[in-house]
Structures are given as C-alpha cells and as structure tokens.
C-alpha cells in the first residue's frame, strides 16, 4: 500500500547547503523532511538524501566522527533504502577519490573520482548551467526538455562503468552527470538549484519511490 | 556547452535593496524577497546578495534576510558582506547560501581564503575585488572602495587562484553606477591572469553592455545591479540580447523575447 507522505531524511554531516535542499523538497511533492545525523531518524525515513559541498576527505571524516559510516552502509548497502546523492554526495558513494591524496569512499558503486584534466580553454571549477544528455528513456527525466540545463559546480568528477551512467555532460570531454545503481541515484549537478528542471527531477524521483512504498 | 551566466547583484543596506552610485550614493528600491521571486522566474542563472553595511558596522551577515531570500531562490545564491570567520561561512551556508563572497577580509587575511577553501571547497569561495585605475594600472581597494591597498589587481588575482579561490567577482569602482559599460581593460586583465571563472561587474547602463563582458572582456559570467531594478522582465530581455550578441545563454522563462528588437532602455518593441 502506498504511503501518503514519504519521510525524507537529509543527512546532516556538516557539509554544505542543506537549506536549499529543504527549500526545494518543500516545493515538490507533499513529504515530510528532516535534517538529521540521528540514527533513529535515518532508520525511520523512507528516503535518504546525501547532499554535500566541500572536500572528499572532510566529508568522510565527518561521517565517521558522527558515527554514520556504518549506519549508512547498513541502510544503503544492506537494507537497500533509496538514496539520492548530490554533488560531493555522489562522489563519496564511489570507491575512491584522488582529491587530497588517495581517499576511500563508501564503495557502493565501483569507480573513482578524479579532477578535471582539461585544456586552458576550460576553467575549473566547472561552474554554471550546462546541458546533459540523458542516456536512455528514464522516468526520472519525465517531462523535462531535451538536453536540459542543470547547475554544476565542481572540480572533480566520477568515473564509472557505462552501465551505471544515466546522464552525461561534456566539459572538454564527456563525464558522468548522473548515475543509478539499484537503490542509489546520484547527481553531479544540483537539482535543488536547477530551477524548473531540478524541481521536476526531484518531484519525479520522490513520486517514483512513493509508488513503491 | 557551459552557458555564460547572468547574475543580478542585490545590494542590501538596512535590509532594503538599494541602487549604488560610485559606492557613495544609495537609492532605496524595495524588499529582497520580491526581487528574488521575480529574478528566479526571469531567466537569471544565479543571484548575489551583498550586505554592504556589514563590514563597516563590524557585524556578520544578517542570517534572517538570507534565510528568507533563499526560500524561493531555486538558482544558486552567493552571499557577501561581513564574512570574517569559518563560523560566519558555516552560518551563511546554513541559512541557504551556496557560495560566499569575501572582499576586505581576503586582503586583511589571505590565509583565510585557503582555510575556507579547504573546509568548504574552492567552488564555495568567491573573492570580490573592487578595483580602480591608478596611473595606468589597476589597484585593489577595500572598505567599500575607499581604501587603496596598493596591491596590483594582476598580482592579486593570481595569488587568489593559488590560495584556493573558486571564482572572482571583479568590480570597477569608477564604473559603478556610471552606466558607461564594463571596463573591458580591467576584465581582460583579470580573465587573462587566472584559470578560474570570472564574473564581470560595474557600469552596465544598457543591457547591450552585458554581452561585451563575455565577448570582449572574456569573462564567464556577467553581473549588474542597478540596471535590473525598475524594469519589468529586464533580465529576460538581457538574456535575449546576450544571445543575439554572441554569448551562450540558458533561456528558460515562459516569456520569450528572442524574436524582438529592443529600444534604448532595453525594452522589447
């Protein structure tokens, strides 16, 4: 039976602009949103959101300090709870990153994170609105225009097997803009700051999961 | 393709939006929330809020103002004014900002840029520079454009990139409120000396000036404040003209002006 109001927990681990994620979610579908690092809250939520801006190492360090590393592993990898990871959140679901030396991520998705290696024509960070290519027909992008613009702001990007890539973007070369594996969906861009396209994407995501609850 | 960004700067004084003229005279315009509601639906790519009294009054940014502004702001929000500590940044981000802008404090304490970039990521740290031409070169000014630091802009921007700044907002003090257009020499000086994105600011008096910041000044984004106040749909018209003049832009508004001509005030005809 479908629950009327899904409970969404934005994981608070001291990394970045949580408020904008809350604002955007409150503008999509009816849902209850909490921002928390409390395990009970994570436990009772239907959807977890792992946002984040900042550096890879700090993110992992903060998650460990708040004793969330094992809890998240359990929720996402074992219990297969739906997870949406955004920007730095997307990067830490990978196995490793070259940011700040070699750093270990959660490893839920095989692959790594590397810095943009582009010519001087391309400035780093990759900052601003850029259009993505959605690979196959995907419910998440239902009702969103062709080659939609989303807001990016990052210096590192994910490298993973083609089978997980649901959208790509071109900045000197093609890189992963969005990926999906089982219960995990991750975006390199910021849907919460991508105006109409972003709000629609968040709405589609929550609606899809709501149907499965 | 990455689009050139159009960014209105909302200058705040005593919780009201003001127009600034040479950093000296300020004309009150109205409430911040109203402006944000309009801008977000009028094709702007980002919004910058600058609290110009914060540093002078020795206080932090007004968080309630940011919280309110952020609520309906579904494009990235940069906040500047009065940011002097890691804790200030944390608070402003918590209130809903995505990036912060540092000006005076970056000059007083350059190491702060590195500390902030390490903690929050380079992409979060915009350094804003107020520049003025002094005997054929450009110097960095602080204290709302009143104090000459003696630092050359070309040296400063290179140093900022090394220190970890993610982006530079370059403003010409002489052009501020002048309506003469961007100082293209200044823009080129900055954009040719760094490999991080540069936002042009200061002097737009005709929305045709905006595209020149990109096409002739080689900046990645263009900002303006005064011009966008008082004119209905000003930013949508600005986008249409930018496109015509060769910039790469995102057009998302339901209102489209691509096939119109424009009068001298930038109004579609």
Image (tube, rainbow, N blue to C red):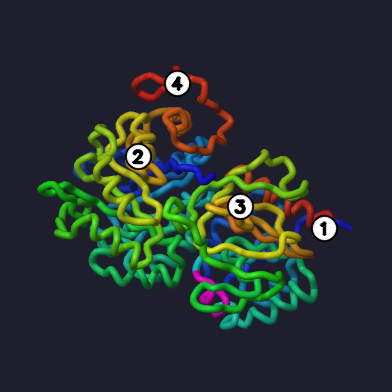
Disc 4, disc 3: CB below 8 Å?
no
Residue B268, can we see it?
A: yes
Residue A18 is marked as none
Q: Which residue is drawn at the image coordinates 50% and 70% (left, top)?
A: A55
Q: Which residue is mark 3?
A: A191
Left or right for A190, reference B91: right
Question: Which image quarter is the C terminus of chain A in?
Answer: bottom right
**Measured from the top left, where is residue B160 in percent x and y?**
31, 62
| Residue B101 quadrant | bottom left
**Which mark is nearer the camera, 3 or 2?**
2
Q: Which residue is drawn at the image coordinates 64% and 52% (left, top)?
A: A168
Which secondary structure lies at badge 1? loop
**Which mark is nearer the camera, 1 or 3?**
3
* Residue A60 shown in magenta: yes
Residue A3 is marked as 1
**Measured from the top left, where is residue A16 in percent x and y?**
51, 65
Tell me, yes or no, whether dots 4 and 3 are on the same chain: no
């Amino acid at each position: 039976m479908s629950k009327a109001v899904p409970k969404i927990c934005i994981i608070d681990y001291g990394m970045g602009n949580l408020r904008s994620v809350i604002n955007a979610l409150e503008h999509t579908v009816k849902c209850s949103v909490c921002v928390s690092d409390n395990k009970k809250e994570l436990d009772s939520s239907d959807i977890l959101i792992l946002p984040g801006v900042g550096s890879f190492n700090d993110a992992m360090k903060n998650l460990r300090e708040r004793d969330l590393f094992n809890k998240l592993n359990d929720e996402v990898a074992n219990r297969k709870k739906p997870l949406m990871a955004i920007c730095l959140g997307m990067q830490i679901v990978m196995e490793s990153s070259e940011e700040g030396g070699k750093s270990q991520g959660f490893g839920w998705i095989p692959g790594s994170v590397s810095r943009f290696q582009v010519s001087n024509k391309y400035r780093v960070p990759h900052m601003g609105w850029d259009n993505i290519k959605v690979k196959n027909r995907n419910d998440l992008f239902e009702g969103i225009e062709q080659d939609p613009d989303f807001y990016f702001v990052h210096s590192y990007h994910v490298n993973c097997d083609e089978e997980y890539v649901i959208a790509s973007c071109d900045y000197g070369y093609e890189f992963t803009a969005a990926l999906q594996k089982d219960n995990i969906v991750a975006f390199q861009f910021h849907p919460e700051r991508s105006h109409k396209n972003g709000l629609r994407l968040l709405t589609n995501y929550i609606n899809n999961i709501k149907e499965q609850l | 393709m990455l689009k050139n960004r159009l960014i209105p700067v909302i200058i705040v004084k005593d919780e009201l939006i003001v127009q600034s003229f040479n950093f000296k005279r300020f004309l009150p315009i109205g409430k911040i929330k109203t402006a944000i509601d309009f801008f977000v639906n009028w094709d702007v790519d980002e919004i910058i809020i600058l609290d110009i009294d914060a540093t002078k009054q020795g206080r932090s940014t007004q968080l309630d103002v940011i919280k309110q502004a952020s609520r309906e702001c579904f494009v990235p929000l940069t906040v500047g004014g009065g940011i002097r500590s890691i804790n200030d940044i944390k608070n402003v981000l918590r209130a809903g900002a995505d990036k912060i802008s540092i000006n005076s404090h970056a000059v007083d304490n350059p190491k702060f840029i590195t500390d902030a970039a390490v903690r929050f990521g380079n992409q979060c740290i915009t350094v804003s520079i107020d520049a003025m031409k002094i005997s054929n070169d450009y110097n960095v000014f602080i204290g709302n454009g009143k104090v000459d630091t003696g630092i050359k802009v070309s040296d400063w921007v290179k140093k900022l990139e090394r220190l970890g700044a993610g982006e530079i907002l370059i403003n010409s003090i002489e052009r501020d409120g002048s309506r003469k257009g961007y100082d293209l020499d200044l823009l080129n000086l900055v954009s040719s000396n760094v490999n991080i994105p540069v936002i042009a600011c200061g002097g737009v008096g005709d929305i045709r000036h905006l595209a020149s910041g990109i096409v002739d000044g080689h900046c990645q984004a263009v900002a303006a404040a005064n011009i966008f106040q008082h004119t209905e749909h000003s930013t949508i018209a600005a986008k249409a003209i930018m496109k015509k003049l060769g910039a790469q832009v995102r057009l998302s508004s339901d209102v489209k002006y691509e096939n119109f001509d424009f009068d001298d005030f930038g109004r579609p005809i």
